[in-house]
Amino acid sequence: MSTTYNQVYARAVGNPTAVDVDALCVLVGGILDNLDLGEKRFTVDPGNIQTRTATTQTLLQHSQLGQKPVLDMWNFLCLRKEFESHKDGVAMQSGHRQGVYFLCILLTLEISIYQVVNMVVAKSWTMVRHFEGAPKLDDFKLIEKELPPLKDGEVLLESEFLSVDPYMRPYSKNALKGGDVIMGSQVARVIESKNPDFPVGGYYVAYAGWTTHFISDAKGLNALPSNWPDHLPKSLALGAVGMPGLTAYFGLLEICKPKEGDVVLVNCAAGAVGSLVGQIAKIKGCKAVGSAGTDDKLTFLKEIGFDEVFNYKTVSSLAEALKKASPEGYDCYFENVGGKFADAAMQQMNDFGRIAVCGAISMYNDSVPSTGPYIQPYILFKQLCMEGFLVTRWQKQFPEGQKQLLQWVTEGKLKFHEHITNGFENMPAGFIGMLNGENTGKAIIKV
Amino acid sequence: MSTTYNQVYARAVGNPTAVDVDALCVLVGGILDNLDLGEKRFTVDPGNIQTRTATTQTLLQHSQLGQKPVLDMWNFLCLRKEFESHKDGVAMQSGHRQGVYFLCILLTLEISIYQVVNMVVAKSWTMVRHFEGAPKLDDFKLIEKELPPLKDGEVLLESEFLSVDPYMRPYSKNALKGGDVIMGSQVARVIESKNPDFPVGGYYVAYAGWTTHFISDAKGLNALPSNWPDHLPKSLALGAVGMPGLTAYFGLLEICKPKEGDVVLVNCAAGAVGSLVGQIAKIKGCKAVGSAGTDDKLTFLKEIGFDEVFNYKTVSSLAEALKKASPEGYDCYFENVGGKFADAAMQQMNDFGRIAVCGAISMYNDSVPSTGPYIQPYILFKQLCMEGFLVTRWQKQFPEGQKQLLQWVTEGKLKFHEHITNGFENMPAGFIGMLNGENTGKAIIKV
């Protein structure tokens, strides 16, 4: 049994011993001793003490309905006596609300375990309203919410690294409404478990949104590969060995289908995905051409092996820059940008070129759809194949992809760079910065 | 040996008999008797008569170089005597130039055959200048040109049916310069052959441009399937059992990859390709939705089995028409039009939809590239695959495709309609009409 003041775990399986119950009482007492109830100062009214059975029934009912038992302090005090005298089955919860702890006690006669569980408060970033144009800081609101007790099969996780990715901008439009927690993935650690397959301490990648804590039925949890080297940051599971890595890996190999000697073009080349696309293209014997928006990024791209790079913001003509970088045209085009860049790139494609549409970051902030020359004539006369993809379509192949990516990273064939924003409270700023291209490599929020 | 005045074939294999040579002389004499040399009235200058040997050498040299022997009438008269005395090997040619016949005689001592061959005049439609906007009648010019004598391995063909297709409009831009004969295919009959594998009388599909006659080295000739039913018009080799049929067949099956129960959208549905796409979709168990520009065409589409049709010119909203025709969206989209139609259709595609870009007829007359909303967001978020194609990529599979198409046509599963324009002189009008959508089914020029 371990106890900390802000994060409480007390568990025993089987019939609790007197020692367990004593410890529980110490814990409860300790918390009580520090109570500051503020406005909600309690009064004890012994006349209201209910019978043990009735209270138990009421609490069980609340519990079965999945509602947080509505107990105030007199409930606690009333039940304390019951608790002390009935040692054959007790569950306890401590809840944090408005800065003070409330304690709720569930008496259960049916089960022979007891728990003292911290009612964890999850901090989450919500979207106040749909973004208009570029997201602004006041479009985000931090909320706090007590998490309910775990049910059998569930686990409680704490986010350590969170991912901010371009897709969140366009996806927010249809997937979210005002007040919703923003979607996203994280590397999180299990801090409580009612699922033996997901023990406390395990690290998992989850898709739980912008939140510090969350309860999972464990179905959406993906364990880090068992051979994850100790020296490798676990945040890579959100980057080179995670979704962006898999995006680059499958998007390039399955849609662009690069052959040795092909010329591969990628924009946002210094981004989480682009930087990997270029390196995988090189591993596959291709020429890699990348564009980025700062000279520092170009330097980074050359360091990680790109053959040709250019700054799309400073070249006088995208068409000329593309021609110069590859006078022989392009066989593969890994598209992250769209818009004017795409207009220019379509013209430089070789016959039978393959275009993997992974993103269209230049268009995500458009309030009205932007327009450009129709691309169908290029598609037609050059017999191009343009395919959009979400990496989830290869979900069944993720393990093999992740294995390959981890191997390349471990061997040093795939270099990575992370742009870390510290502090969960800075997550909106990290997101906005990523959309503005402030990151080189993967943008990560470290809680 | 057969002779006609405007089209002369005189052939004997082996040593010519006196009868052959007499017939030849009659022929030559007959032509001479009708000579009207106009400005080029010849004078006989007996002093210029060369020796037989020298003349033979000269003529053989011309012949070997593949040049048309430059002979005028005194050559003929000089050689006539030689011809009459040397019956052991003679070749003759008659040529039509500026409305009169010239006769050229080649004495050959080396070969034991003789030929009298009409110097066929090919009529061809050339492009005067690059089209600007919609092609106009005065963008075309009819030219006439004598064809040279056949070399070994070559065949002379006469077009019976010619094809006018939308692709000619955009292809003219890069593939042709002013004065060039316009590209295109035809069903043509061999009228002279120096290639035993391609005998006189055989019908072939060729890609010889807008021309009545042409010489082929036989490499580009595709025989009609040997099991071609007699009752089937040979023009179908330019339509349902030809390039448009193969375009519909491979484009739909290989790129749209329709599964049973899929909804297939095709525009220009009453056109040569579209009308087949819808029918093949039905054969494959799909729902076929087609758009066309007249109510007569809609009637035709319903007759050939389309499930839903609409007139894109008269509906108040393309989006609504598309939704109404298939509230469940579209899995496959066979694109012939582009532009605004495509804008609307992209929005109605289902996730993982396949778009085969076969044409973009609405955009072919654009002088400057037209613009519209970028389609990348649809491609991306619906994970669409859009691929352009030219049917030639499946050239190796043409026999199997043609076999299947012919079978479907013969079984009545694939109905066809032809829009015949009579007269080679009307070919530009037929082409312009086809671009304007005047045709239901395949637009064909009958010479």
Image (cartoon, coloured by chain):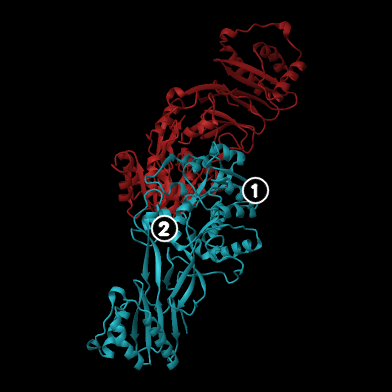
Chain colours: A cyan, B red
Mark 2, residues whose alpha carbon is within 10 Å: few (<14), some, or many (≥20)? few
Residue A212 visible in rendering: yes
Q: Which residue is mark 2?
A: B260
> Disc 1, disc 2: CB below 8 Å?
no
> Does B346 appear above or below A186?
above
The kind of residue tagged 1 is: Gly
Determine whether the residue tagged by mark 1 lies in a helix, strand or loop: loop
Pick whichever, A94 or B215, lies toward us. Answer: A94
> Does B16 appear above or below A267?
above
In this view, the mark in front (1 or 2): 1
User: Percent x, y for residue B267?
Assistant: 39, 43
The numbered mark 2 sits on a residue in which chain? B
> Does A420 appear above or below B274?
below
- Judged left or right of residue B408, residue B47 is right
Residue A326 visible in rendering: no
Q: Which residue is mark 1?
A: A261
Determine whether the residue tagged by mark 2 lies in a helix, strand or loop: loop
Pick whichever, B125 or A273, lies toward us. Answer: A273
